[in-house]
Image (cartoon, rainbow, N blue to C red):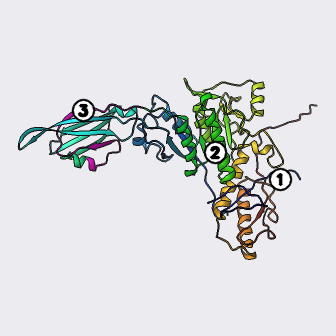
């Protein structure tokens, strides 16, 4: 469905639901969106399908281990599973994206066959389902089954992951459609000692692959995306990520944010700039790796939650801790970073985004991610309940729409997400401008922020 911002003097061409947010401080909802979904790319994956999303949920986070080549609880050499684990500390759904796929590991397995014409040999070809060096850890064994036929056993790094019993032909083995190995060949099976696959190679991701990843965001419904790309060579793709999230928020009406390490001066509410990191025990995370937790925590936060002073579970110290002066400067620059509270816990210093330039239409409240979550969830509730062609564009339809809008306002007020609601004035159809197939609304909304700066004046006696 089309969405985004609109200009009253110009209007829109496509049917859709268009919403403008403007700061106004200068003088039972039917459907509500859910949060908790984050995108995590794996820039250094050693296995898996390239340029496709793999959906993982908190109910069964390891359900796609066959596609990843690892359990998410494994310590893989390139620390890709770490990103998923950190995101799942707060997120409910993780979409994993593998940027590039390397060469597939393979093996030719010679099997002695006893036929009526005498001893002969058949060849079974085993190919890793996906490319990458992880495929070299597969081993295929064909054992005679005492009850008849043969058992085909697959190991991954010494651990048995699949076994198919009592098979007689290669065609029967192909038909089981193993999720790890693609088998090919024809004819009878025969016993064969364990054979390692080889030739699997990794293909490093390029900036072009990252650009393809950015282009794919429109195809997924998500709240935040982790963008763990850092260094001077990634400066251009960071700008591309900024452009994309601006387009999705302003041009498509999608309430999404991107979390970028050392993003610099982005000056936009859709970007969270992470500028330091934490250690998990003796394991020091890079700033790019810490973005996975930030993205998961941001996605998992409700519109009534602030991440300010939220504890980072498992963190034991801050990497790149900032002094008081550095912290003040970082906040003024729109940085999201970690600090140590009075209980020696590792916490988020301040739940802010990169917006640092304020105006009448975007006052300083727009820098607060909690406020942005209120706006984004309200926008999603509007889009879910006010699709095109649901209501008549006449006085009866306007009455119904205003009634529904006030119900949405009440739900948000009851949840303490918004305040100072005027049910007579804060959701009205502009009955002068609304005509033909265009309906205009005037909505008032004041988000509830958290009490994060507390000032006491103590008079002593």
Q: Is residue 265 magenta?
A: no
User: Can you give x and y, in whole percent of width and height, for residue 250 in the image?
Assistant: 69, 51
Does the rendering let one see residue 229? yes
Most common SS among magenta residues: loop
Residue 115 vs residue 150, the one in the foreground: 115
3 displayed left or right of 281: right
User: Can you give x and y, in whole percent of width and height, for residue 432 in the image?
Assistant: 81, 70
Q: Mark 1: which secondary structure?
A: loop
**Image quadrant occupied by the N terminus:** bottom right
**Image quadrant occupied by the C terminus:** top right
Q: Which residues are magenta?
A: 174-201
Q: Residue at label 3?
A: 194
- Structural distance between the alpha carbons of marks 1 and 2: 27 Å
Q: Are marks 1 and 2 in contact (CB under 8 Å)?
A: no
User: Can you give x and y, in whole percent of width and height, for residue 211 in the image?
Assistant: 57, 40
Q: Is residue 200 magenta?
A: yes
Q: Residue at label 2?
A: 244
- Structural distance between the alpha carbons of marks 3 and 2: 49 Å
């Amino acid at each position: 469905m089309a969405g985004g911002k609109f200009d009253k003097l110009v209007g829109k061409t496509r049917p859709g639901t268009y919403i403008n947010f403007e700061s106004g401080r200068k003088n039972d909802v039917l459907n509500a969106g859910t949060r908790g979904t984050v995108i995590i790319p794996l820039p250094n994956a050693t296995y898996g399908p390239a340029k496709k999303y793999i959906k993982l949920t908190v109910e069964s986070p390891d359900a796609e281990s066959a596609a990843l080549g690892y359990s998410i609880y494994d310590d893989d050499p390139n620390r890709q599973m770490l990103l998923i684990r950190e995101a799942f500390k707060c997120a409910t759904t993780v979409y994993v994206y593998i940027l590039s796929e390397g060469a597939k590991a393979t093996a030719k397995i010679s099997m002695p066959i006893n036929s009526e014409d005498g001893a002969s040999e058949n060849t079974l070809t085993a190919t890793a389902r996906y490319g990458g060096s992880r495929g070299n850890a597969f081993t295929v064994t064909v054992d005679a089954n005492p009850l008849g036929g043969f058992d085909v056993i697959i190991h991954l790094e010494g651990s048995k992951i699949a076994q198919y019993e009592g098979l007689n032909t290669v065609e029967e083995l192909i038909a089981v459609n193993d999720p790890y190995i693609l088998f090919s060949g024809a004819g009878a099976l025969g016993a064969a000692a364990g054979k390692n696959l080889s030739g699997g190679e990794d293909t490093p991701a390029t900036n072009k692959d990252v650009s393809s990843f950015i282009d794919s965001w429109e195809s997924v419904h998500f709240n935040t995306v982790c963008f763990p790309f850092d260094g001077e060579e990634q400066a251009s793709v960071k700008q591309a990520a900024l452009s994309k999230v601006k387009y999705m928020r302003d041009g498509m009406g999608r309430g999404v944010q991107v979390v970028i390490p050392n993003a610099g001066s982005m000056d936009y509410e859709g970007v969270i700039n992470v500028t330091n990191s934490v250690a998990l025990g003796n394991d020091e995370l890079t700033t790019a790796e810490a973005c996975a937790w930030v993205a998961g925590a941001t996605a998992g936060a409700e519109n009534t939650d602030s991440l300010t002073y939220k504890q980072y579970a498992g963190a034991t110290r801050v990497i790149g801790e900032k002094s008081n002066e550095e912290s003040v400067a970082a906040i003024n620059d729109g940085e999201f970073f970690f600090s140590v509270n009075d209980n020696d816990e590792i916490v988020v210093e301040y739940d802010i985004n990169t917006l640092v330039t304020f105006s009448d239409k975007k006052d300083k409240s727009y820098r607060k991610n909690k406020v942005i979550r209120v706006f984004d969830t309200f926008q999603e509730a509007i889009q879910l309940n006010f699709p095109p062609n649901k209501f008549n564009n006449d006085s009866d339809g306007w009455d119904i729409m205003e009634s529904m809008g006030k119900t949405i306002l009440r739900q948000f007020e009851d949840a303490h997400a918004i305040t100072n609601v005027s049910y007579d004035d804060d959701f009205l159809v502009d009955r002068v401008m609304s005509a033909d197939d265009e309906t205009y609304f005037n909505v008032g909304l004041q988000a509830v922020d958290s009490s994060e700066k507390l000032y006491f004046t103590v008079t002593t006696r």
